[in-house]
Amino acid sequence: MGADSVRWGILATGGIAAAFTADLVDLPDAEVVAVASRSADSAKAFAERFGIPRAYGDWDGLARDEDVDVVYVATPHSAHRAAAGLCLTAGRNVLLEKPFTLNVREAEELVALARERGRFLMEAMWMYCSPLMRRLKALVDDGAVGEVRSVQADFGLSGPFPPSHRLRDPQQGGGALLDLGVYPVSFAQLLLGEPSDIAARAVLSDEGVDLQTGALLSWESGALASVHCSIVGGTPVAASVTGSHGRIDIPSGFFHPDRFVLHRDGRDPEEFVHDPAAGAAHNSLKHEAREVMRALRAGETESPLVPLDGTLAVMRTLDAIRDRIGVRYPGEAPEADPTAELTPA
């Protein structure tokens, strides 16, 4: 890693990869040096679009590129384990899009591999890196609302999405929960940790993925969290945390908040607003990129903002919800070999 810049590789060329790369090239201490896709034409077009010097028509070329300090993996989440595993095995550090993997078994394999190889690994949960979300968490941790009693969060898209869309495709880990529900669950666990009990109901598609899911999470403290996700109805995408002495409301776009309101018993409401100097709240992925680069320069293999144990805890919750609603993806038989290769077929 150079003293002045961190050299990035981009694995995949879809919409989120383009959004992240657009933010990366705007950072003076980041350099995007390579991109890979299973399509050479797609990789070349992406490289030309962003002025990236090297384009690979396979994942292996990028994984073995010694000039790459860290790889951002932005494939569909059904390919996360294979793509990230290939990069870690080759000695690359990895920022892996959410949801981390299809299930906790795959997540545990990647975490074990990263720790064995001494490589940096982080889920791209940009919500955790948002300056305003970090401020909210600090207020809650400092007792601004008292003891947390309940959390509510929702994320729904109106669609409609045809059966051919990736959100309806079991082969790509489709459904509302993994793509959207990961945010409400991660918000609740950011504030309360891993729940002790989980109940859930869902409406499933003909393909067997969840069209909408509601879950009630509970903790031994008595706290409850109600989380909801949908790909058949647009929701406010709002969140709130209520405590024994107050409440914090995020009125919309809670996973990239531009403001929230703190209500304390006996006081006037206080509004906290995103600082535009930190980048636009609604589309800035720079915060997670900065955290990765900070950690790499510090020689850290995990981020304290997005710790791997926390990622595993969220994956356990998502697995438990899927178990309760009856969603299982192809290849997820209980007898699946946990030592399966971490490389693409």
Image: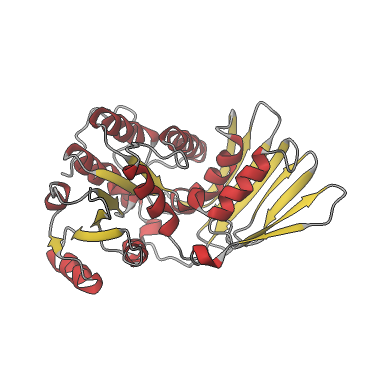
Figure label count:
0
Give the camera-side residue of 11 and 34: 34
Indicate the colouring scheme. Answer: secondary structure
Give coordinates of residue 246: x percent, y percent: 78, 45
Quadrant location of the C terminus in the rendered image: top left
Residue, far right: 266
Left or right: 40 as drawn, with respect to 109: left
Give coordinates of residue 9: x percent, y percent: 23, 55
Residue, far front: 3
Left or right: 74 as drawn, with respect to 39: right
Q: Kindly identify the residue that appears in the image at 26 percent across and 32 percent down.
A: 118
Q: Write down the quadrant of residue 10 in the picture.
A: bottom left
User: Is any part of residue 228 visible from this angle?
Assistant: no
Left or right: 175 as drawn, with respect to 145: left
Give the camera-side residue of 240 and 122: 122
Q: Kindly identify the residue that appears in the image at 13 percent across and 64 percent down.
A: 40
Give the camera-side residue of 205 and 231: 231
Left or right: 43 as drawn, with respect to 29: left
Give coordinates of residue 245: x percent, y percent: 80, 41
User: Is any part of residue 220 visible from this angle?
Assistant: yes
In the rendered view, tell whether residue 120 sits above or below residue 287. above
In the rendered view, tell whether residue 328 sits above or below residue 23. above
